[in-house]
């Protein structure tokens, strides 16, 4: 007979241990191991299956079998549909996470209201706010007349009982999954076992009834979705809603998508009456570009199939002898900056060892594109020499440790977007110079050639 033992589960990563310990051995966090009520059954590895006791044959087909494209529920918000890959899929489960106050509930309330006005049956379940609070926010946003079915509940059994009494909704929004409670197991709402069980029941309902389910998830201090990692594996799509309260814009980024790509983003701006879509993000991140100043350059980043032009700003401050220089980066990888500085010193003869270096991506935008290397290097050279880069210039290219400037993907799209916004010059890898039209292109095979060009050597 199986032996019953106590089981302790990490509330951040879901790691399971048979004894309590102060630090989780998997994620390294302290004081996150909590005993799950009811314990657990610990059994040895099972022996070989006895096929005579049951089982059924499963259907096997080839990859060339006909497959119908899934039906999409278009929300009417182009930026949201772009991040989803074309809209919500019937019977799918979507998890959206973000910092408190970033606008998750606002975004979903707007999408629910648009779908309801278009004739779709929409149900919004709030576990954090009272119904009147949601109604007041909807009125402030001008959505008070939308025929959205609203309820406040935290019991999964009550929610499913109510939904089973009528026609299934086309869209079901649950805000948030950490507040839900399933009476099938013991435990407080928000624990690993409760989040897992509640999500499983709601997802099963969505799959059986063809309802598009959207779950709102809290995030931890490092930006990851709180709760067990298995929650992200259970859903079909994971969206991350990013942004700072002090900044105007919000970015909706697909982290996982079984029905589309994970390289698309949706851009929104927080306004008085909710979130407004930003069809041209480049215009948002390039506002207030006036006189030419040293240390500023424009980089055409790629977010999926969409080019976004952002300004990279660098400041180099010379220090007195003996002082320890500081390196500060906002919106880019700190290790990548250290690499570019090392290449500039070792391969190009520039000295930053006695200088403080500050790098910032304007608007709070975050760049992970390696093509930003050349734009960062140009901004650093400009700041060090106090020579402005022409305001109508864009720069992109990847820098190798040898000092070579390498080509990056989607160069024509980057240049096309720059030309559309009025930029007339481009600094780019020499391998990407062929076929450039509409801009005066300067190609560089090495970083040293860029330094000679900017310093007039």
Image (spheres, rainbow, N blue to C red):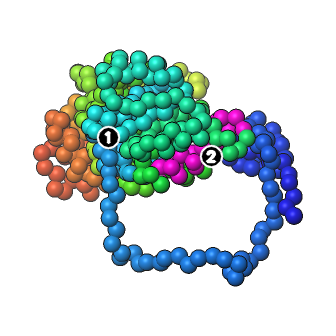
x, y percent for residue 445: 30, 53
x, y percent for residue 294: 31, 26
- State the residue lying farthest toward the bottom: 52
The answer to which image quadrant residue 13 occupies is top right
Q: Is residue 142 above or below residue 78?
A: above
Residue underneath mark 1? 120
Report whether residue 396 is seen. no
Q: Main secondary structure of the magenta part?
A: helix
Q: Residue at x 59, y 76 (%)?
A: 56
| Mark 2 or 1, nearer chain start | 1
Q: Is residue 250 above or below residue 341?
A: above
Nearest the eye: 136 or 287: 136
Q: Quadrant of the N terminus?
A: bottom right
Nearest the eye: 441 or 408: 408
Q: Magenta part of the protein: which range?
A: 187-207
Q: Residues within 10 Å of mark 1 (few under 14, many from 20)?
A: some
Mark number displayed over residue 196:
2
Mark number displayed over residue 140:
none
């Amino acid at each position: 007979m199986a032996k019953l033992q106590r089981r302790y589960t990490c509330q951040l990563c879901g790691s399971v241990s048979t004894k309590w310990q102060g630090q989780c051995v998997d994620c390294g966090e302290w004081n996150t191991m909590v005993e799950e009520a009811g314990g657990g059954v610990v059994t040895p590895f099972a022996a070989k299956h006895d096929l005579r006791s049951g089982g059924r044959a499963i259907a096997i087909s080839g990859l060339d079998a006909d497959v119908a494209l899934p039906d999409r529920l278009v929300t009417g918000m182009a930026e949201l549909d772009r991040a989803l890959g074309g809209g919500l899929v019937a019977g799918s489960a979507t998890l959206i996470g973000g910092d408190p106050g970033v606008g998750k509930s606002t975004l979903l309330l707007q999408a629910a209201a648009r779908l309801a006005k278009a004739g779709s049956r929409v149900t919004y379940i709030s576990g954090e706010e009272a119904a009147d609070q949601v109604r007041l926010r909807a009125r402030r946003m001008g959505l008070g007349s939308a025929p959205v079915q609203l309820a406040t509940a935290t019991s999964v059994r009550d929610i499913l009982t109510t939904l089973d009494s009528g026609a299934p909704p086309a869209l079901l929004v649950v805000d948030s999954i950490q507040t839900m409670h399933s009476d099938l197991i013991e435990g407080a709402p928000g624990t690993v076992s409760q989040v897992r069980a509640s999500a499983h029941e709601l997802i099963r309902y969505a799959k059986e009834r063809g309802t598009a389910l959207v779950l709102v998830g809290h995030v931890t201090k490092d930006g990851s979705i709180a709760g067990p990692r298995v929650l992200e594996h259970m859903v079909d799509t994971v969206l991350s809603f990013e942004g700072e309260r002090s900044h105007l814009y919000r970015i909706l980024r697909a982290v996982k998508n079984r029905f589309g790509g994970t390289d698309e983003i949706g851009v929104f701006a927080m306004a008085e009456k909710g979130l407004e879509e930003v069809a041209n993000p480049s215009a948002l991140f390039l506002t207030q570009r006036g006189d030419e100043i040293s240390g500023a350059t424009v980089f055409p980043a790629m977010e999926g199939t969409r080019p976004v032009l952002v300004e990279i700003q660098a400041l180099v401050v010379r220090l007195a002898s003996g002082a320890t220089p500081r390196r500060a980066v906002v919106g880019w990888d700190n290790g990548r900056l250290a690499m570019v500085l090392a290449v500039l010193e070792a391969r190009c003869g520039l000295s930053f060892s006695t200088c403080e270096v500050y790098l910032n991506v304007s608007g709070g935008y975050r760049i992970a594109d390696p093509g930003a290397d050349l734009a960062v290097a140009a901004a650093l050279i400009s700041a060090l020499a106090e020579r402005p880069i022409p305001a109508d210039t864009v720069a992109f290219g990847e820098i190798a440790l040898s000092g070579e400037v390498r080509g990056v993907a989607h160069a024509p799209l980057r240049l096309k977007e720059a030309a559309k916004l009025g930029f007339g010059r481009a600094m780019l890898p020499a391998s990407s110079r062929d076929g450039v039209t509409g801009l005066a292109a300067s190609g560089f095979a090495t970083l040293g050639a860029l330094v000679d060009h900017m310093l007039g050597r």
